[in-house]
Image (cartoon, rainbow, N blue to C red):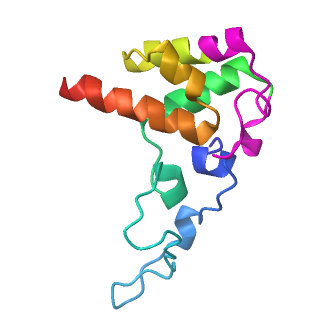
Amino acid sequence: MGISIAEMLGMELPDDDLATLKPDGESDIEIVETRNEGEKSKESLESGGEPDDVEEAVVAALLNETSVPAEKFSPQLTLRTDFDLDNIGLYAVIAEIEQELSIEIPDAEIEKTMTLSDLFVVVRSHKTSSSTG
């Protein structure tokens, strides 16, 4: 089995065989809430949720276009400095994401996208608007 996106971003997930149910139906895994009450997570990776198609498309595109190993990925990494993307590299990543998710992202939004977290937000906003519009 390969490495999960959550593991690529440095999140520790319990092994499935460690998650056993106790006789009273409770799990032996403690769930810890790390966000402030009422604060919405910008991406499900921060909440420890399952990766969605947006996260999978973004991570796959970055792995194809950069030399940064997956285990070094984290939401605060900068696209231009940490991932070493110039304009051509960034647009190659965006083009791959757009093709994979059948969306279009305006150039003006791409230019404002600084971090991996920003990229998740921008792609999600267009994924949502294309599926509702």
Q: Quadrant of residue 14?
A: bottom right
Look at the picture and state if 115 lies above or below 104: below
- The residue at 27%/23% (across/down) is 130
Residue 5 at what x, y percent from top left?
A: 59, 44
**Nearest the camera: 29 or 115?**
115
Number of marks present in the image shown: 0
Which quarter of the image is occupied by the C terminus? top left
User: Could you tell whether 91 is left or right of 120 in the image?
Assistant: right
Residue 48 seen in the current view:
no
The rendered magenta stretch, by its main secondary structure, is classed as loop
Residue 16 at what x, y percent from top left?
A: 53, 63
Q: Quadrant of residue 46?
A: bottom right
Farthest residue, direction left: 133
Residue 56 at what x, y percent from top left?
A: 51, 33
Residue 92 at what x, y percent from top left?
A: 62, 11
- The residue at 71%/36% (across/down) is 78
Look at the picture and state if 53 lies above or below 87: below
Farthest residue, direction top: 88
Residue 133 seen in the current view:
yes
User: Could you tell whether 77 is left or right of 31 in the image?
Assistant: right
User: Could you tell whether 24 is left or right of 55 in the image?
Assistant: left
> What stretch of residues is rendered in magenta?
68-92
Query: Is 79 part of what is drawn in magenta?
Result: yes
Which quarter of the image is occupied by the N terminus? top right
- The residue at 74%/44% (across/down) is 71
- The residue at 47%/38% (across/down) is 121
Look at the picture and state if 107 lies above or below 18: above
**Nearest the camera: 61 or 40?**
40
Look at the picture and state if 125 lies above or below 49: above
